């Protein structure tokens, strides 16, 4: 009976030791992967990347607002790492190229994808 209790205690200690070691390694790998993610993104954390994308988006909207000839009410802007996608509708086909050129001129924009279309009048 004493031998069985001794084996149970020894087995319990061994399982606890193994699980603590595995937990410590898991925590170390999680820290290493977080460090790798920061390094891979050029030193920016996920939060900083989101803030930079939002700031670029605001800069694009501000640039469009400066041009009174552009009806930017139905234009959506998505920014991700310098790449900007503009979508929505404009009242005139000539505004598609104008909007694209304005966005390309914004500091920090590396490429522009336009998914703009001409707004159809009601009833047509």
Image (cartoon, grey):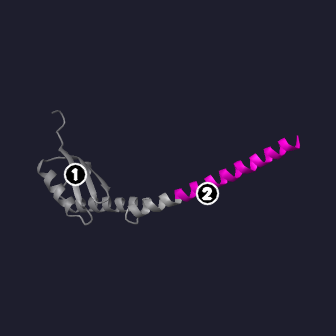
- 60 or 111, which is in the foreground? 111
Mark 2, residues whose alpha carbon is within 10 Å: few (<14), some, or many (≥20)?
Answer: few
Q: Which residue is drawn at the image coordinates 11% and 51% (left, top)?
A: 94
Q: In the figure, is residue 27 to the left or right of 74? A: right
Q: Residue furthest left?
A: 94
Mark 1, residues whose alpha carbon is within 10 Å: few (<14), some, or many (≥20)?
Answer: some
The quarter in which the N terminus is drawn is top right
Magenta region: 1-30
- 2 or 84, which is in the foreground? 2
Instruction: Find disc 1 in the rendering and name its residue.
Output: 113
Q: In the figure, is residue 94 to the left or right of 63? A: left
Q: Which residue is drawn at the image coordinates 24% and 51% (left, top)?
A: 86
Residue 21 occupies quadrant: bottom right
Dot label at residue 76: none
Label 1 element class:
strand
Instruction: Find disc 2 in the rendering and name its residue.
Output: 24
Q: Do the residues labelled 2 and 1 touch (CB within 8 Å)?
A: no
The question of residue 119 being in magenta is answered with: no
């Amino acid at each position: 009976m004493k031998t069985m209790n001794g084996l149970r205690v020894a087995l319990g200690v061994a399982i606890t030791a193994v699980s603590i070691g595995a937990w410590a390694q898991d925590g170390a790998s999680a820290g290493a992967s977080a460090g790798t993610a920061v390094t891979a993104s050029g030193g920016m954390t996920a939060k900083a990347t989101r803030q930079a994308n939002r700031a670029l988006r605001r800069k694009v909207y501000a640039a469009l607002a400066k041009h009174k000839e552009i009806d930017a009410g139905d234009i959506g802007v998505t920014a991700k790492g310098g790449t900007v996608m503009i979508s929505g509708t404009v009242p005139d086909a000539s505004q598609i190229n104008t909007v694209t050129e304005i966005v390309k001129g914004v500091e920090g924009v590396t490429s522009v994808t336009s998914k703009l279309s001409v707004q159809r009048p009601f009833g047509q």
